[in-house]
Amino acid sequence: MEHSASRREFLAASAGAAVLGMTAASYARIKGANERISIGIIGCGGRGFGAHMTGIHKHDKAQNVEITAVCDVWSVRRQRAAAQAKQWYGRAARQFVSYADLLALKDVDAVMIASCDHQHTTHLTAAADARKDVYCEKPLAMDFERLKAACDAVRARKIVFQAGTQLRSFASMTGCRKLYTTGILGTVSRIEQRRNGTKPYWYHYLADAKAKDVDWDTFLMGRAKRPFSAEQFTGWYGYRDFSDGPVPGLGSHFIDLVHYITGATFPTSAVCLGGTYVWNDKHKFTCPDHVQALWEYPEGFLVSYATNFGNSSDKCFRIHGDQGVMDLVHWTRPVLTAEGGFKNRGVIRGTKPVEPVEHPDHFLDWLQCLRTRKTPNASIDAGYQHAVACLMAVRSYDTGTRQIYDAAKREIRAG
């Protein structure tokens, strides 16, 4: 479709682009309001279908976007996603088994990656090389070298990238960030989350999948060959070949919020312990049902993440300062309290709600940036940062040694 902007609109947009420091190539990719943005979905499971597609659909008319292609190795999910697109847009989305075939479509402008954890870097690097803008689920990577390569590809191609750490776009969390910068908590020494449950989340994904409906080799994507397993395919969150368990699976959201609220970027060291202490059963899941990770940050605080999938009590999310506590256990209703702080300064009195700061929801933020070419709220730098912290903890869990991160050299090593 041809751009219908007037000369006056073009000059105004060009001036805005200059202010933003855009390159000519970047500006050339700006689509006019009357130009539809075509989006492809890579991975049509719980996140791709249940979160990405529905999240985009809320804004598709206002933002003039359409889901035009879907990709999944399971025909059941692929067909369901295509049918949903037909219901919304009057025509079914094109269906693909291979991500490469979807990325080869010239008319697809952007992709949303909701594939399995072990596939993220492959899909992300390929999408960047194809010059497609990307929304990619967390954690970004299971391998550090592949993480760096994928992030470098995103930066080199100058694509618009959003990591799927959507909590940072909550008005409540943006409010916490604003309040934190005032210094009202005093000296912050510890930030902790305990995200517990009675049962590991991967059990909820187990389903009856038939080998004839799945491209098993494409799913494995470089992992050791093995006979088709419906358990491993649908319950992949619980197997170390395809996921590293609760720290990157749930703790990545927490770590990203630590970075977002405090302004910290990378931990200097990490240790992690855990194991399967409750859910030893016929499924033979290999991800731990209990884990405890600790990170030390150069800002002078300790960050703790724990999961107990044997008892759901005692959940928490707290930022501890010497003047009080910011309690975020209820994500949409955080509070500030003087609990445990020195009361002589009197900067915090009683318990008060944290005032929210409105922000576009995470999907809308990305869609808007597809047109403006601005940097979304969860940039590639933010994605890299949460991935580094998670990989440090996973390496410590696997090796039993403390892990150090050298930001200048982009190296994780034992120390």
Image (cartoon, helix red, strand yellow):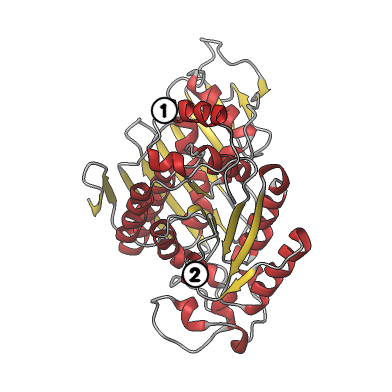
Q: Residue at x 63, y 32 (%)?
A: 172
Residue nearest the viewer, comparing 7 with 260: 7
User: Residue 59: x, y in percent?
Assistant: 70, 45
Compute the Cα span from label 1 to label 2. Answer: 35 Å
User: Residue 352: x, y in percent?
Assistant: 67, 22
Q: Is residue 80 above or below residue 259?
A: below
The label on residue 18 is: 1
- The amino acid type of the residue labelled 1 equals Ala
Q: Is residue 61 above or below residue 343?
A: below
The label on residue 311 is: none
Left or right of residue 330: residue 374: left
- Considering every residue shown, the one lying at the far front of the view is 7
Residue nearest the viewer, comparing 190 with 110: 110
Q: Earlier in the sequence, mark 1 or mark 2?
A: 1
Q: Is residue 147 above or below residue 181?
A: below
- Callout 2 secondary element: helix
The label on residue 99 is: 2
- The amino acid type of the residue labelled 2 equals Tyr
- Callout 1 secondary element: helix
Q: Residue at x 32, y 34 (%)?
A: 298
